[in-house]
Amino acid sequence: MLPVTNRTRGGFAYIANVINVSLLLTASGIAAHAAPPPDTAPQLEKTAISSAPANNKYDGHIPPPGLGDGESVVFPANSRWPIIYRDRNGELGLTLPMSEGIWGTGDWFGLRHSLEDSGVDITGGYTNNMLGNVVGGKKQGFTYADQIWLRADFNMEKLIGWKGAHLGVSVIDRNGQKMASLYTGNFFNPNQIWGSESFELYNIYLDQSLFNGWVDIKLGRMAVTDDFAHSALYGLLVNNGIDGQPNAICSSGYMTAWPASTWGGRIRIDDKKDHLYGMFGLYQITSRQYNPNYHGVDFGIRPYDGLGMIAEVGWTPEFQPHPRPVDTPKVSDVPPSDGDDGWHGMAGHYKFGAYYVYWPDIPTFNGQKAPGTYGFYWTFDQMVYQAKPGSDCGLTLWGACILAPDQRTAVLPFSFYGGAIYTGLIPGRSKDKTTVGVIYGAFSDVYAHSEKVPTLPEGDRGVPTYELVLEACYTIQLSKFWNVQPDVQYIINPGGTGRIPNALVIGAQVNFSF
């Protein structure tokens, strides 16, 4: 989408600017009144930190903290402590006096840059879910849940000369209520921040890159879906059925996901020339992995723990690539940087995976013993329309399918997830994303006739068949480190029994990176 500053001057440009300012002010009001002061989200991918070189003068002075090349203060005018700024595309954004790039809390008076130069990168964030069930479900009500996380990445080459090695350590604190059990009565929990409601150690792992990035090995405490069946695009929705990864890979396949970790390792091989890769992983499977009482520090491996094996192959093409022009236009015409130089074609990701879990203690729905379970998954996302050559603005389609054939162990033998994302739908808001999604799960016949089905208000259990969720979310990118996501979910056949009325959930998610 073309920036407002490059459009024909007139009524349309004026209306776009009004919408632009209104979105900023409305979203900042929502964040200020509906939630405590914001702080980040795991789905925010790290991007390049903006810099303010000493020779980039602003009214005879070095630019205010947090503003980089081509960025300028809008309000308060000529201030060293801006609140609203204009980026190099001419679009408005909110900032904080000490922020810098994705760092909402700034560079800590130079300490953060010193640590990075020494090989220590510290990031973190805060996310909250504020959702209300306004129609249908078990009953109407509001829930609030949040999480704070901190992560440290140690570049071992800078620290001790160990080439290609990184040590990662992270912790997380979660609090709040589960919308599904309290109000909607459905399987796909509307708020993604649920599980392990405590303070705990999330992961400790060593990541070793070899042969110029062609081989990567990762070992330690981590979750399976940190690497497998994962896409950053899933974080643009709020429902736990898809946020982070497709739900069935965990609920039916016993693979671990944020915020639960176990011992494991994976090896990845990349064919950079043909955009192909393959991964294989081995992970500890245990009934203790989602127990918050262990706080993530139960490092033991018991004889009755299981072993999860998972493999994935993928293709990451880029159609109609757009090399950056030799004679780059003025700064305001350059698309925002997304890593590298920000110019790219229509990117896609196509993945196929399979898993097998060997674990004599797998619970079944008919009381029989099951020494293992297995399944398959297919996921894809593909940009199909690029509004401006070389930019992120345009339409991306995505989808996922999980097949878990053993109905004795799988709650959802078949589930489907899909939708569309349009970046830059509103003129002057090229970083905002409009996302729609559908989540469908068909319940196992064995599960449907078991005592594992939650009791209905009438006292019986019913026979679950399927559940369907329709969701729409608009991500308002207030700044590089802060976004607000108004969200609407319509839940059809909650719990799958037909006994609970369809539910309408309205709310928002706020993400802030420290």
Image: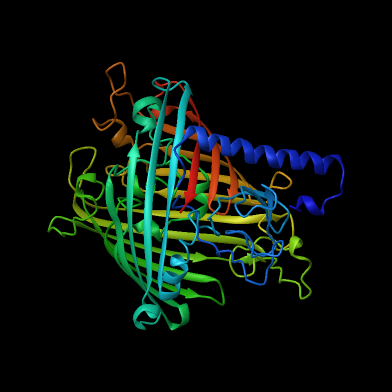
Q: Is residue 84 above or below residue 504?
A: below
Rendered residue at 49%/60% (across/down): 351
Between 311 and 46, the one lying in front of the other is: 46
Can you give x and y, in whole percent of width and height, for residue 341 in the image? 64, 69
Q: Is residue 453 above or below residue 50?
A: above
Between 293 and 275, the one lying in front of the other is: 293
Left or right side of 232 for 435: right
Note whether residue 250 is visible: yes
Q: Residue furthest top?
A: 458
Way the structure is coloured: rainbow
Q: Is residue 194 above or below residue 506?
A: below
Which picture quadrant has residue 499? top left
Q: Is residue 62 above or below residue 479?
A: below
Left or right side of 250 for 127: right
Rendered residue at 31%/21% (across/down): 456
Total of numbered circles in the picture?
Answer: 0
Left or right side of 278 for 392: right
Can you give x and y, in whole percent of width and height, for residue 187 in the image? 38, 34
Q: Residue furthest left?
A: 303
Q: Residue furthest front?
A: 60
Note whether residue 252 is visible: no
Between 420 and 160, the one lying in front of the other is: 160
Which picture quadrant has residue 308? bottom left
Can you give x and y, in whole percent of width and height, for residue 492 in the image? 48, 28
Between 326 and 212, the one lying in front of the other is: 326
Which picture quadrant has residue 356? bottom left
Can you give x and y, in whole percent of width and height, for residue 404 in the image? 36, 48
